[in-house]
Amino acid sequence: MATIKDIARRAGVGVATVSRALNRTGYVKPTTLKKILVAADELGYVPNRQARAMVNGATMTLGILIPDMDNSLFMRIVRGINDAAYPLGYSLLVMDSRGNPEWERQILRTMLELRADGVILFATPGTPDLIPTIEGTPLVVLDRLIPGSSVPQISVDHYWGARQAVELLLKECRYPPAFLSGPSMVTSSTPRLQGYLDALEHAGFSSRESRIAPGNFTYEGGYHGMRSLLTAISTSLPLDGVFAANDLSALGALRAIRESGYVCPDDIRVVGFDDIEAARYVNPSLTTIRQPMDQIGQTALRMLLAQIRGHELKDRLVTLPGQLIRRESC
Amino acid sequence: MATIKDIARRAGVGVATVSRALNRTGYVKPTTLKKILVAADELGYVPNRQARAMVNGATMTLGILIPDMDNSLFMRIVRGINDAAYPLGYSLLVMDSRGNPEWERQILRTMLELRADGVILFATPGTPDLIPTIEGTPLVVLDRLIPGSSVPQISVDHYWGARQAVELLLKECRYPPAFLSGPSMVTSSTPRLQGYLDALEHAGFSSRESRIAPGNFTYEGGYHGMRSLLTAISTSLPLDGVFAANDLSALGALRAIRESGYVCPDDIRVVGFDDIEAARYVNPSLTTIRQPMDQIGQTALRMLLAQIRGHELKDRLVTLPGQLIRRESC
DNA sequence: GTGAAAGCGCTAACAT
DNA sequence: ATGTTAGCGCTTTCAC
């Protein structure tokens, strides 16, 4: 591959002039400029960013570490980052850890070796231990917050999203709605649960009237959780509304409802959380709390760039509002 | 950030020795080895891959160019590549072109500037023009084939997948099934259409008995295509089966069927193509032809590495079989 | 066994 | 307005 040296020789000038010409930095006589451009073109010159990075420090590369590349919730955020970062000249180093803490650690290390200018981390239960590893490199943590950390973090407002969901259910249903919970290890589960509890209490129900089954954030979990809720129905406490801690478990619940001979939303209404792609496609389509994924991506990038540029962050913890999307299930 | 120079100073040795020690290349006295390792650890040394790449040529980085990061079909393939590439020490530079030919060209260029060791391209209608751009860098093209090109390409067998789908429909239905076609610009549309036509003919139907509506590979397209099919039903030629060129349009068709008062699969059976994530979640769940995404990813990586290592490829055009996934819709 | 030095492609003083 | 040169962090001969 051609180098500026080759261009310099061909154009009969020095390498510095070539560098100046190609980067439009410093003065170059129009005649020589043209000569250089022609030579570069003829040689099919492609600048070597690694070499450039060695001297001026920035690789113009951002590391993105995700626990699952095949999760539309995550990828919509990454796409948001991509779309905002690309026009700025940044490229994305995207790696999937499959939720494996050991991989996470190694991948992070690799990103440092590659000298990514900054890193965006989709938090997993193992993330907190990782933070010290990359001290010194700008970092933003996404999606599931790490409690009591000073690392810049961004997430949707899980608590208020849950309250909105449950309040809608409360308005549409005659009985207190049930809850399909998320895994307790995942930090976003807690505020969503709390939102459910508080909404119930706020509506005048005692905590004894709350009904909670594990949904585990999965399709299968939602299915089984819903089944157990369904078998526990009594004439004294009927069930006509369910809030699922995320869309995947809501979809599982939808199936369980159908298989048990009930109809959603006529018999039982369902609200989910996240607004994954499939939420639009199922029958009935799913009413849910939408995570503002594009906004999360943009905010993450903004906060990362601020750090890279050495600015002080005023908010180290950004919470974005979720949006109620009304569809057929409630 | 610490460099080998710092380590050398601290351990009281030369940089060459440090390099040899850290890379376990060449002999180093156990005592000095330990000293060096300790020094490196104390300094929190992280090797600089860019610098290494400058001398030995390989960046251990692979470029992946996708038209849409939020497409589970694509991302399952990328994840397959990730999982296979990571243990080999490769990192993925993933960029989304949003199907914009101009972006595609620029991103490709950037990947060259970053000196990716190889590039995997998810083909779009604009791809063929791009190929010459990266001549000299190992390349594999995925998903939608470019006809008459000598570039290594991998895809599912669209034609036979379509035939399988239609043959299943033919077996389960009483009347010749209809077809929701893909956009003619996308090369995978043609063989899927041909598979439909040939299956019909093979079953003894004349081409006059084929019914085709545009599905356009989208949810909305499938919905409208299905509606027009539904309004065209006559007593002389009833409709009880539909093959959609992809799952997204099949999901749209499902909705149109429901809204028109028909029941799937009782009245009308539906088969899709791809096996996207939502196919499992909808009601009825979608019978479809599954693209072997993991296998596509692995094969792509294998062919790319072969080129990187300078081997000759025996098959420049790999076609993988699709797998019929039987669910509720047929 | 280990160190000195050259060089990968580029940018940024410093000269001229 | 342009050329010369010193690195950036690392690996790799080539000596000792």
Image (spheres, coloured by chain):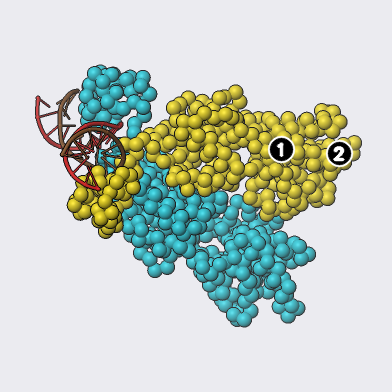
Chain colours: A cyan, B yellow, C red, D brown
- When the figure is inspected, residue A227 is found, relative to residue C1, above or below; the finding is below
Residue C15: % across, % down: 9, 29
Checking the image for residue A152, the label placed there is none
**Label 1 Cα crowd, 10 Å radius (few <14 / some 14-19 / many 20+):** many
Task: Please give the name of the residue rendered at 78% of the width and 47% of the height, measured from the top-left corner.
Answer: B330
Q: Disc 1 or 2, which lies upstream in sequence?
A: 1
Q: Is residue B46 left or right of residue B224?
A: left
**SS at mark 1?**
helix
Task: Name the residue located 25 percent from the left edge and 46 percent from the top edge.
Answer: B17
Q: Secondary structure at mark 2?
A: loop
Q: Is residue B100 visible?
A: no
Nearest to viewer (mark 1 / mark 2):
1
Which of the pair A223/A101 is nearer the observer?
A101
Q: Position of residue B240 (x, y in %)?
A: 83, 43
**Residue lying at 49% horizontally and 66% vertically, measured from the top left:** A187
Say left or right for B238 vs A96. right
Q: Nearer the viewer, residue B231 or A39?
A: A39
Q: Which disc, if any, is residue B161?
A: 1
> Label 1 marks which chain's residue?
B
**Residue A35, above or below B210:** above
* Residue underneath mark 2: B175
Give how far across and how far down residue B242 sits, in percent. 77, 41
Which residue does the image show at 61% across and 25% down from the upper left? B147
Quarter location, residue B199: top right
Query: In the depicted view, which residue is nearer to us: B70 or A47?
Result: A47
